[in-house]
Image (cartoon, grey):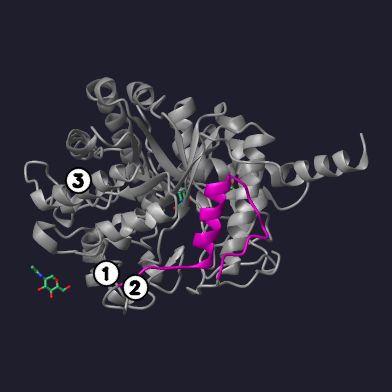
Amino acid sequence: MNFITLTLLLVYQVHGLSFPKCFKFGFATASYQIEGGWNASGKGPNIWDWYTHTYPTRIADLTNGDVACDSYHKVATDVKLLKNIKADFYRFSISWARIFPTGQTNNINPDGVRYYNELINLLLANNIKPVRIISLIMPIKYFPYSGIVSKPGSPSTNLPKSDYFVDYADKVFSLFGDRVKTWITFNEPSQICEFGYSNGAIAPGYTQLGIGNYMCGRTLLIAHAKAYRLYEKKYKQLQKGFIGMTVHAVWFEPAAEGKTYAEAAEISLQFMFGWWEHPIYKGGYPPVMRKRINYLSAQQNFTKSRLPYFTKDEIKLIKGTADFLGLNHYTSFLCSALDSGAVQSPLMNPDTNVTCYQPSSWKRGASIWIKVTPWGFRKILNWIKKEYGNPKVLVTENGYSDKGELQDCNRVNFLNDYLTELLNAIKKDGCNVQGYAVWTLMDNFEWGSGYTERFGLFYMNPSDPNRARIPKMSAYVLRNIIKTRKIDTTFTPQGFKACPAS
Ligand SMILES: *[C@@H]1O[C@H](CO)[C@@H](O)[C@H](O)[C@H]1NC(C)=O
Ligand SMILES: *[C@@H]1O[C@H](CO)[C@@H](O)[C@H](O)[C@H]1NC(C)=O
Ligand SMILES: *[C@@H]1O[C@H](CO)[C@@H](O)[C@H](O)[C@H]1NC(C)=O
């Protein structure tokens, strides 16, 4: 081997990895965060409309999603953006109350159906695959009888109802399933249940610490499974689609060497991620979750465990209900078991008896919880591979928040570094990852943070009556990655300055 071939070989090893031909790149959005048209043409109010109108001061900049990016009126604009940026797929969600204003399926809003048909048809005409989230942003009229949680004090009696969701899913499959082939039942059930029904930090702001989360979780898992089984039985043969759930997973790294740290990290993963995936891939709740919550419930003098039991039939119903694993991933934490000295962060689930933190030395985004830890991406993908037998994974969200700058070097570096780790996980570790969607297409209403945290690859100013979408540097960088299937950290699009290395 002469010097030139050796050099080429080294270069190849460092820069040669490229995304497989069949690997798909996409962009993710969510209905309430972009659509606007909150009361347009027959749409019913949903829990977020109610929440932002009732508690305006709970949103950092007092904004809401009434108009948001006005995507309700901008189907053609949005599809053109996706086309120009070379998206293979678009992950978006349905607003339940836009097609079923009261939540019940007897009352359908034709304009809502028209809106989603228009979007889906235009995507397909541009060769972009629609990936749909059925979504659990409930119509407000439906909430009182939704049965997501039951009355306080009765954690395991008064079983929550999941059938309304299944009726809704059934209608959605029949309306759009001839064209939509990838379905996600729920997005981030941990966040829905912990923040919506346990500590009350987001809509519907229900507070029942350590009880509401597990009731909500049980309802969602059963609703997901019933929707999956319904699809399997009634639509799969005809429509030939795939269905899964998307779960948010932080990577939890042991804070130090040693068994107690490793256990602390593992417990955290099981409580956040295994809560959903263990019932789906292995059957029933993770043993560590069952054991700890039973123990603590007894200590607290509950007559029953705060973690409601599944029946044998329910365990069977839920097991195997995923054609792929949807993963939202952004960041990592370091974990330790609680010793007498350590104080648990209030953000942690008290049932874990574990505390996790992010060192202040880690680089962060505009969102306090996003610390840039690309190495954690490869680790969570490998943990999933090992824990669940290398399932098919679709990364349905990953992204970075800043204040909205167009020369967004921090986001450019974030994407280059996270995608490099993803590539390593696929090529070097054999993780079965089939696609990646960046969060998010454009700056949008970021829940409680309003517009103070910007995740978009396109800039959008909510005070601009036209709500123009302006490409940031990162939009061109990701476009180049999609085009070349490679990561080139030196790529600098025209009109932008080279970014300092990360
Ligand atoms: C919709 O809401 C806006 C405020 O966001 C209000 O001005 C308008 O009158 C409402 N339209 C209907 C049809 O209720
Ligand atoms: C549970 O009951 C025991 C015995 O009545 C009592 O000593 C203890 O304080 C109770 N624990 C809680 C958390 O209320
Ligand atoms: C929590 O962890 C500490 C330290 O490991 C231990 O002493 C304590 O008993 C644990 N508490 C519970 C409720 O498991």
Choose top left, top right, bottom left or bottom right for residue 379: top right
Q: Residues within 10 Å of mark 3 (few under 14, many from 20)?
A: some
Mark earlier in primary sequence (2, 3): 2
| Res. 139 in view | yes
Tell me if label 1 and label 2 are in contact, CB under 8 Å.
Answer: yes
305 within the magenta span: no
The residue identified by callout 3 is 117
* Circle 3: element type: helix
- Rounded to the nearest angstrom, the CA distance separating label 1 from label 3 is 28 Å
The one nearer the camera, 406 or 219, is 406
- Rounded to the nearest angstrom, the CA distance separating label 2 from label 3 is 34 Å
* Circle 1: element type: helix
Name, please, the residue furthest toward the right: 2
Choose top left, top right, bottom left or bottom right for residue 81: bottom left
Judge left or right: residue 491 versus residue 304: right
- Rounded to the nearest angstrom, the CA distance separating label 1 from label 2 is 8 Å
Between disc 1 and disc 3, the foreground one is 3
Label 3, ligand 1: CB separation under 8 Å: no
Between disc 2 and disc 3, the foreground one is 3
Res 363 label: none
Above or below residue 472? Residue 339 is above
Mark earlier in primary sequence (1, 3): 1
From the top left corner, tell me how far across and down residue 338 is, in percent: 64, 53
The residue identified by callout 1 is 52
The residue identified by callout 2 is 58
Magenta residues, start to end = 467-494
